Amino acid sequence: MVASFRSADCAPLAVFFFEAGKVPGVDDIIAASQPGGAFAVSHVPPPEQGWVELLRDGLTFDLHGLSGGPVMDAPEVDQALGVPFDQLAGAHALMLSPGPHLAGAGRLLPVIRVGVELALDLARIGSPLAIGWIPARNAIAPSWFQKAVSPWLGGGPFPAMALVSLRHDVDETVRSTGLKFLIGQEFQLSDSGSGGREYLTKVALRLVDWLVANGPVSAPCEAVLAGTGAVFLEAADSTRIVARCC
């Protein structure tokens, strides 16, 4: 059996940052997967390979970088929330990827939802410094990650703070990173009024939820966002949305 990590169609979704020497091993993962628990270990290659296959809600995911196998360097991070950047320097990584039978389906929300639930399960094993959502190029303190995704898993709005990064530029705009993974487009949001940085962030969070629910923008349209009002949207090209608060 070949690990999904070797397939471009099953690229890693989440990463767990650990201090060197504190990365869990295969035995730690097996011990945490009790019968009747949230997830099961469905395949265990030789320990020196450093990965296992996990089963949750009928879907399989591969976890790579376990202690005893090849060391995996953590990916580059553009945004850190609740954890200082310097704590991530030299961190080792565990990578969570969709299994081979999910090849090409990693962008589907049902798969992402199960992957996020599994990430919460795995965050309780050992003491990760942070959890990162790889398409968003972020790193988030485990408690912050849980706080961000739990409402969504319970039926609430999409967890933009965890699965999409929002960056304020010097020109008073907000740009997204990670939304392209979900809908094929990122956005640049501006406000012609004087709502300020906090208001623009709130609009951006609402806009992520709207776009995830409604899909990519192909023609000019208006999105009416709960609690913040309307935003005018148009496609700059096939991968970029220009958004303006009305």
Image: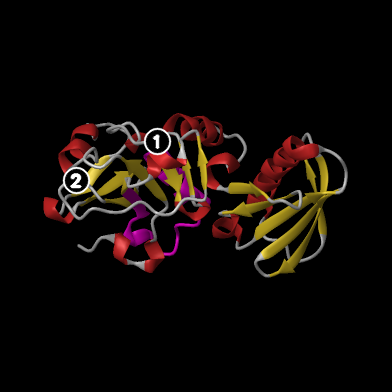
Q: Residue furthest front?
A: 86
**Tag 2, which secondary structure?**
loop
**Which amino acid, by three-letter code, is at mark 2?**
Ser
Q: How many marks?
A: 2
Q: Which is nearer the eye, 40 or 138?
A: 138
**Tag 1, which secondary structure?**
helix
Residue at left offset 25%, top offset 42%: 20
Residue 203 x %, y %:
74, 41
Q: Which is nearer the eye, 55 or 49?
A: 49
Q: Are marks 2 and 1 in contact (CB under 8 Å)?
A: no
Classed neighbour count for the residue bearing mark 2: other residues with Cα under 10 Å, few (<14), some (14–19), many (≥20)? many
Residue 140 relative to residue 177: left or right: left
Residue 110 x %, y %:
49, 48
Instruction: Check the image and report above or below for 86 versus 62.
Output: above
Classed neighbour count for the residue bearing mark 1: other residues with Cα under 10 Å, few (<14), some (14–19), many (≥20)? some
Q: Which residue is mark 1?
A: 120
Q: Which is nearer the eye, 90 or 123?
A: 90
Residue 125 relative to residue 216: left or right: left
Q: Which is nearer the eye, 213 or 242?
A: 242
Q: Which residues are magenta?
A: 94-119
**Which amino acid, by three-letter code, is at mark 1?**
Leu
Residue at left offset 47%, top offset 32%: 146
Residue 234 relative to residue 49: left or right: right
Q: Foreground mark, 2 or 1?
A: 2
Q: Which residue is mark 2?
A: 67
Is residue 104 located in the magenta-colored stretch of the structure?
Answer: yes
Residue 212 relative to residue 36: left or right: right
Instruction: Check the image and report above or below for 173 versus 240.
Output: above
Label 2 to label 1: alpha-carbon separation: 20 Å
